[in-house]
Structure formats: structure tokens, C-alpha cells
Amino acid sequence: MSERAGARPHPLVELTRARLLEFVREPEAVFWVFVFPVLLALALGIAFRAKPPERLRAVVVGGTPAAARVAELLAAARDLDVTVLDRAEAARALRAGRADVVVESGPDGGSPLAVTYRYDLTRAEGRAARLAADDALERGLGRGDRLVAREEPVTEPGTRYIDFLIPGLVGLNLMGSGMWGLGFAVVQARTRKLLKRFAATPMRRSDYLLSFILSRLVGLVLEVAVVVGFGWLLFGVAVHGSIVDLAVVALLGALMFAGIGLLVAARPRTVEGVSGWMNLVQLPMWLASGSFFSYERFPAAAQPFIRALPLTALNDALRAVMNDGARLPACWPALAVMVAWCVASFALALKLFRWQ
Amino acid sequence: MGESGGDRGPRPGGGAVRCLDLVKRYGDVTAVAGLDLEVARGECLGLLGPNGAGKTTTVEILEGLTAPDAGVVELLGERWGCGRDRQLRERLGVQLQETQLGEKLTVEETLRLFASFFARSRPTAEVVAALELEEKRHARVGKLSGGQKQRLALACALVGDPELLFLDEPTTGLDPQARLRVWEIVERFREDGGTVVLTTHAMDEATRLCDRVAIMDHGKVLKLDRPSALVAALDADQIVEFRARGEVAREALAALPGVCAVARRGDAWQLSVRRIDLALPALLALLERASVPLDALATHQATLEDVFVGLTGRGLRDV
């Protein structure tokens, strides 16, 4: 044992060290902070992965020469898969969603050719299939194009769901690990009378609270890197803005949730008590702060409140930097909201903190 | 109360602890009801009393963890809340009742952490050796036995090289061997000139460790003296305890030859006896005459426990 006489270890360093050791020796905590967000991103990324455009399915009710002609004309359409079935089978296919449109030709020999489209008006695929079928038939029967159209398909990264999701997961992760990590540790120390024991030493109380924040900053680097790196490697989610800006936003987010975590944990005496408060605080943000889907879907009246939520501000700033490549000054409203939460929660936590 | 018959009077340079007229209330409950204490430097004072007597509250007021509603506390010539609390804490060692240290840290990491809080601390290796924890240095706290945990708690109290050590029930719940080791550690601290204030509800602990014992109940000191003087003041060598199936008059018991005090404790009687050779046959004869059958009878040497029963009519472990 190297006992360095004179070089006394700083209490803040020792407290932070102890905090980190306790964290890494808690396998559940490591799972929730590092493994869980990756699994979540993986599951959602696979569920919403970019698929090649789906082909529309047309079913022709067969059995007549006219039907054969209709099927032949439809087969020329680019987006349609054509099948010929008898009437009952065709109806079943439509009901089961295996067909988007059923095309039935009129009595034989009639001129002009008569058809009936049967489809679900409420499904976009139904309407698209009907239009594609109609277009193919008209064209096949000799209608000419009067418009010259050029197509430009959009598939660039940055507009996919996974691009939207990864910054949201980073934000969510910063919130979860900040609040659970701090809240549980503080309340557990209080329940075990460890806070009181510390208060009986010359330890500075601010050192104790600061050690939590420092330990969060160490964890933060890994947390953000894991999720962003994962998104980049597996889904090619790029950071369009600067890495430094991303680091600053993540840092501010971590500090903010450390403050909110300390505030929530300032009074409760039991782990059950603090869990309730944590859930109460986090649940609205899970739903409303736009981690999984855009908060623009909520009514306009709710928007100012949603934008004032800490996680909303963090997600907005993260998306601005990661997806839009914005520089920090451009995200000042979100950053201002974060700074306000940060300062207010720390000040209040220090004031309310219960040591025993 | 106050100083009586101790062979260690307060030394020059002031006492270690002085408190006057301490009061602490929690709602309707008065935990400490006007308490005076004085502890000399180098002395070991024990607060002896049942659960709820106010021992822990008193000690936590002294430790500066609880603010009293009234009264004065002076430790090592300083007072709490005068802007020098941290300097004062540098000189105190504290072991709280039921502190659970972080289970995921090792013995050495825990000590290192506590050592970092003090401007002047003992090398952790030295404390580990003194507290006989070498084998467990790298063991996690969660894996320690009760006795080892308690020694680690003591180590955390001693790592700052304190002048004054507060121990709140240091051996409650430990097996006899583990208690003995804790006692030896406290004795070694005192040999080096340290002052100790401890609470206990174990009379053997108080008898062995303390120069003086304050017997507490309901937030007050009932009696304060050397353990031997307290027992001597009972004016009895032996205690006779018995349970009988039927009514016995207190006056009749008190009138028995050789009996100097009578106390009732639940359904048991307790006689403080100076001459057991006279008292015991007389007691049996009395019960015989009154046709009251005897259920249980025991005699033992008078102890601090009997002093407490004599003062309060209750046992130390009664609730």
C-alpha cells in the first residue's frame, strides 16, 4: 500500500472515485445505463428501418376473356403485382389485406371496356393501388401523356426515423441515468444513515453533492458515445454538426438532470418514496418530450409547456446539432431553458437537502 | 448530580464535554429533559439506560448533528454553530448507531474515503492493523460479519485521529468475542489519552469501559458516579428475585431481616439484600406462612442493572 505522507487525497476526488466504484460494481445499473439504450435503439431501428418501397397488390377477378385482357394491361404497370383469382378468393384476399385493390371487369364484349375497383377507401395503399390500376388500364387502352414528369426519389440519411430516434435516445438516456443514478444513491445513503455519518465528519457538504455531478460527467462521456456510436455503426446515423457542440449540449443536459435528480432526492427518506417521485417527474417527459415521436403532434395549446420541459429542450438541442448541423448559437432558446433548469434545481436542492 | 468521587477530576485546560440544561423535544415527546453532563479529558463516560431514555438524542446533540431546543454544549472548549464547526469535527470521532457503510466498497476504500475528509489523518494501513482488519482489507463491506463491520465503523471514527470519541451502542448485537475485541480497541484509544463518551444498555460494558456512568431515563440523568460507587450505594451485596403465585405485602417484604430495599418489576419482586443468610430463610418462611406458592427464585451479585431497577422499577431491556 502506498501511503503517500503529506499528499492528502482530495475529498472531492475520493468521493467521486467511491461513487464510480459503487456504480460499476452494480451490474443492474450498468445494464440500464449502457446496455438498455442500445437494445432499445436496436429494436426500434429494426422495426422502423428504411424498406424498399412496397409494391401494390392488385387482384383481378378471372374467368372471362375480358378479365384476361385486364390482367394483361395491368401487368405493364410498374408498381403493381397482379394476381388472378376467382371472385370469392379475391374478396377474401381484400379482407385479409393481401390485396390492395380488386379489379373486376364488366360483361364481355362491351365497348368501351368496363371495370369495377373494389378497395378500402381509408387505406392509403388502397387508394394508391386504385390509381395505379386505373392509370395502367387507361394507358394500355391508348391514353397519351400530356405532361413531362421527372422523378427525384429522396433516400438520404438524416431523414429516416432512426435519425430522428438516436438523438431522442441520447436525451432519454441522459435523463434516466442522471435521475435514477443520483436519486437512488442519495436516498440509499440517507436510509442507511450514511449521509448523517458523513455530516459528522469535517467533509464539506458541497463536496458531497459535487462528487455526484463529477461522477455523472465521467459516465456521460460513455453514455453518449455508446448510443451515438451504435447509431453510426449500425444505421449510419451521422452527426451533422460539430462533435464539440454535441459534447457541450450533452454536458449541459447531464448537469441539468443531475440537478433535477438531486432535487427529487433532496427530501425522501425511502427508496420507494424517491422512486415514485422519479417516475412522476420522468413520465410526462417520456411521453411528451419528443424522444420517440415529434411533440408537434400534441395540441397547440400544450406546446409552450412541452417546450419548457427539460427533456424537450435537450432533445431539441441534440437534434439541431446532430440532424440539422446547427451551431450552438442557433439553439439558444433550448439552451436557455436548460441553463434555467440547471441553476434552479441545484439552488433548490442545496436548500432543501436533508442530511438525516 | 455532577462530579462525585471520581479519581479523575477535570484537568487543566478545560474539560472535554460540558453541557448544561439540554432540552430536545420532538412534537409532544421530550427526548431530553434538562440534562447536565461534564466529561473530563481522558475520561470515559457511559450513558446507561433503556431504549428511549434519550441517550442517542443526547449524543447526537453533542456531536452537533441535532440542534437542542435549549441548553449549552461545549466540546473541547468550542461550541457548535460559531463558524468553527469543521475545525471541531476534525477533532471528533463518531460512530453512530446503525450506520450501514456502502456495501460495494472494500474496507480499504471506505477508510481511504473517510481519511480524505480529515486534514490530519492516520495512515489507513495503520488503522487497518490496529483494528485487526488486515485480512479483510480488500473485502467488500457487504461481505463482512457483524463484528467486522462494527470494527470498520470504529476504524472510520478513529482514522481522523480524534481527541474525543463518541460511540453509540458500540457492541449491540455482537457476539461475546466480537464485543471483547471492540472493548479492547476502546481501551487502547484511552491509553493513548483519548476521551470517550459512549451509550449502552449493557451493564457489563459500562462496568468494564467507563470511569463514570450516568444512569438515564426519560431524558434525564438519574444518577452519575463510578460504577463501583453506584453499586455500593445500593447498600446491598446480593439481589434476590422471586415470583410468587399470590399477593405479598410490600411492607412485609421490607420488614424482613437483612433486606434493605424492595422493588417490583412486572410480576417479579426484587429484594436488595445485605445479609442473604438471614434474608433468604426469612423470605421462605414468610411465603410459607402466607401460603403463597413460589414460582421462581434467583439470587445474584448486585450490578448496575440492579441500580437501574432500584431507581426506576424497570429493567434496562424492558420496553
Image (cartoon, coloured by chain):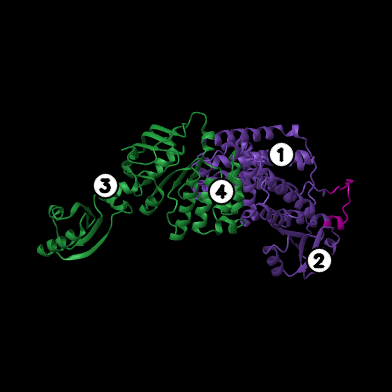
Q: Main secondary structure of the magenta part?
A: loop
User: Alpha-carbon neighbours of circle 4 within 10 Å: few (<14), some, or many (≥20)?
Assistant: many
Q: Is residue B249 left or right of residue A159?
A: left
Among numbered discs 4 and 1, the one appearing first in the sequence: 4
Return the residue at label 1. A249
Q: Are marks 4 and 3 in contact (CB under 8 Å)?
A: no
Residue A66 marker: 2
**Separation (CA) of disc 2 from disc 1:** 66 Å
The magenta stretch is A136-153
Chain that bears disc 4: A
Among numbered discs 4 and 2, the one appearing first in the sequence: 2
Q: Amino acid at mark 1?
A: Val
Q: Quadrant of residue B212?
A: top left
Q: Amino acid at mark 4?
A: Phe
Taking the magenta stretch, the answer to whether it contains residue A137 is yes
- Residue B228 position within the rendered picture, expressed as x and y whole percent measured from the top left: 32, 49
**Separation (CA) of disc 3 from disc 2:** 124 Å
Tell me, yes or no, if residue A259 can be seen here. Answer: no
Chain that bears disc 3: B
Residues tagged by mark 2 and mark 1 found on one chain of the structure: yes
- Residue B166 position within the rendered picture, expressed as x and y whole percent measured from the top left: 46, 44
Q: Amino acid at mark 3?
A: Ala
Among numbered discs 2 and 1, the one appearing first in the sequence: 2
**Separation (CA) of disc 4 from disc 1:** 25 Å
Indicate which label's residue lies in the foreground, 2 or 1: 1
Return the residue at label 4. A184
